[in-house]
Amino acid sequence: MKKLVAAILLATAAPVWANCSYPLDGTQADLDATPITQGWTKATVYNGQSMEGTITPTAGFHIPYAALSHDGLVAMQQAAATNTPMGDLVLPSTGVVHVRMHIDEFPWGTFSGPLSGAGMFVTVLTGNQGPDNTLPKDALQLNVGLLNSNYTANRTSMLIVGQSIRGSYVGSVNRLDPVSLPLPGDVVGFWINVDTREIGLSFRITAVDPNLPPPGDYDLEPLKDSQGNAFLLPQGVTSVAIGLGALVNQVPVTDPLQGARFGATLLTDACGSSEPPPQTLPNGNPFMGKAAPKKFQGLPFPFVGQPPFAGTGNGNK
């Protein structure tokens, strides 16, 4: 928690930005046909950019839910076939964009099983990444989310896992930043500076706390990979697919959190070159989806071991 608080204290306030439309309308058939999402299950989606789900018993570790766009999944199918990074969201030629999620609801109680856990994350993908193709290329994947797990030393954590492949260089990030409860914010994700190619975490603080900056949106310092180098947007990546996901790990049938709900709403100010510019809402806040903003008991971030989703490679810690 001290590490996260220190980072937030050094963060710069993010400008007020408007939310762009990005429908999470991908089907189960779309997920099954896309190599990087094979094995994922389509999440319940409402209001176009929101996903929801329920903690259900599971004997193993898997990702039960994913919410991505149909066009993004089709683009990633082409990316996998051509080994070229692709997505349906065209990045701007200059400036900073944000890809974040609003936490609609999440179970922060204690699971009963020694390896039990659940997580929820926002993701950016280019479709051509993966452990089976080691040829030089440009590819990006980054997942930032919340985790509540008995498997980690600190039960509640923030999860940051990804790869930035630039030619023959593979920059991996696989971090669990432990945090304490209650959660002082309701939005988590990342920013991308298209000019410098840097990527960093982004938060919305909602708590009034003398140890934190005033409530508002904050961009943290740029990420570094496991080798201490900048975790960068590859030059060849000009478009991406974005979405939401969730995971459940070894939840017993008798677990007290069985039936607990989780949900998130995708927030982004990247509209793509083919869409109209975003309109700022009267109150300066982005549209939050169906669920009203809530404060949750936990500022999360953790998972140790294999990355908790398909296609992440072997990411170094």
Image (tube, rainbow, N blue to C red):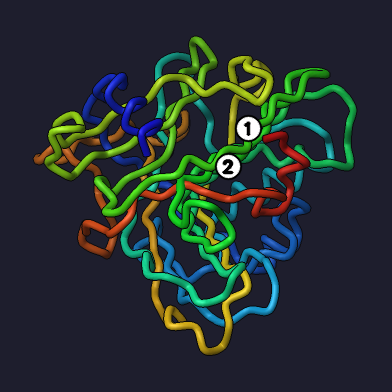
* Amino acid at pointer 1: Val
* Residue at x 45% of width, y 49% of height: 157
Quick check: 35 above or below 200?
below
The quadrant of the rendering that contains the C terminus is: top right
- Quadrant location of residue 47? bottom left
Quick check: 97 above or below 309?
above
* Residue at x 21% of width, y 29% of height: 16
Indicate the position of residue 112 as horizontal and vertical percent values.
50, 77
* Residue at x 43% of width, y 83% of height: 256
Judging depth in this view, the residue of 173 and 274 nearest the camera is 173
Say left or right for 224 vs 262.
Answer: right
Packing grade of label 2 (10 A; few <14, some 14-19, many >=20) is many
Mark whose residue sits in front, 2 or 1: 1
Q: CA distance from mark 2 to mark 1?
A: 19 Å
Q: For residue 207, which numbered disc appears in the image?
A: none
Judging depth in this view, the residue of 268 and 312 nearest the camera is 312
Quick check: 33 above or below 266?
below
Name the residue that disc number 2 marks: 241
Does the CB distance between marks 2 and 1 fall below 8 Å?
A: no
* Amino acid at pointer 2: Ala
Indicate the position of residue 175 as horizontal and vertical percent values.
57, 38
> Can residue 25 be seen from the camera position used here?
no
> Can residue 195 be seen from the camera position used here?
yes
Say left or right for 152 vs 16.
Answer: right
* Residue at x 79% of width, y 41% of height: 130
- Quadrant location of residue 98? top left
Name the residue that disc number 1 marks: 173
